Amino acid sequence: MSEHENHPASQQSIRAEAIESLLIEKGLLSEDAVDEVIVQYNERVGPMNGAKVVARAWKDPAFKLRLLTDGTRAVEEFEFTGGQVEKLVVVENTPAVHNVVVCTLCSCYPWAVLGLPPKWYKDPAYRSRIVREPRRVLAEFGVQISSSKELRVWDSSAEIRYMVLPEMPSDSESTSEEELAARVTRDAMIGVALL
Ligand code: FE
């Protein structure tokens, strides 16, 4: 969705930078602490965590059942850093159902398993259009969902965060869990890409 990719510095990011500089200048915050948070969310908390969850669900039916029944608890088995304060609900893509996630109100997102949300996820155009015309928006992402398939759009909130369990690629029956995890993309776990 190219129109979502190129943003000039938003009011919000200018504001965030101004606040950061002020806090550092006043000695209330160190630059190292800010860098640490960014590294934390870029490298240690990110879609690679969600990918591990997905790969295990594909390989281990008992885990998959736990994950779909209570995502918050199932993910605790991984001991990811970054905390899991909100409730995580995992929704499964099947040959009959495709799921896609949005936060129509702002940008609620399952940080613990997917890291920081992509820019387009926070874009008002995505947030409103994916509800009104999901098939068309998905087509712009390059995903064609046939009209015979049910399409479910999940609206995240501060209390509930959703993650999509994509369908396992058909050629991967004998692939290891680790190799499978490497094939899972962030966008597939939001529901705007297929694998
Ligand atoms: Fe939100």
Image (cartoon, rainbow, N blue to C red):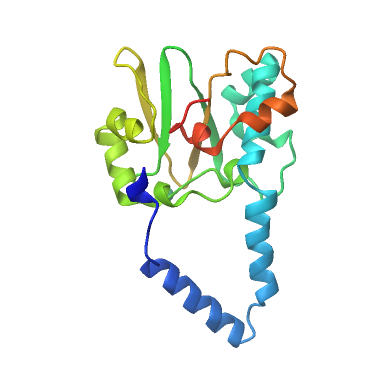
Spot the residue most to the left. 132
Residue 106 in view of the camera: no
Which image quarter: residue 72?
Answer: top right
Q: Is residue 126 left or right of residue 24?
A: left
Which image quarter: residue 11?
Answer: bottom left
Q: Relative to the observer, which residue lies in front, 5 or 131?
A: 5
Residue 182 in view of the camera: yes
The vertical placement of 49 against 180, above or below, is: below
Which image quarter: residue 77?
Answer: top right
Residue drawn at the location 31% of the way across and 37% of the way down: 130
The vertical placement of 36 against 75, above or below, is: below
Residue drawn at the location 67% of the way across and 14% of the way down: 61
Report the number of discs: 0
The vertical placement of 179 against 16, above or below, is: above
Q: Is residue 8 left or right of residue 171?
A: left
Position of the N terminus, as image quadrant, is top left
Q: What x and y, as percent, mark residue 127? A: 33, 44
Q: Is residue 152 left or right of residue 160?
A: left
Residue drawn at the location 43% of the way across and 40% of the way down: 156
Q: What x and y, as percent, mark residue 66? A: 64, 22
Q: What x and y, as percent, mark residue 71? A: 60, 30
The vertical placement of 10 against 164, above or below, is: below
Q: What x and y, as percent, mark residue 60? A: 70, 17
Q: Relative to the observer, which residue lies in front, 131 or 7?
A: 7
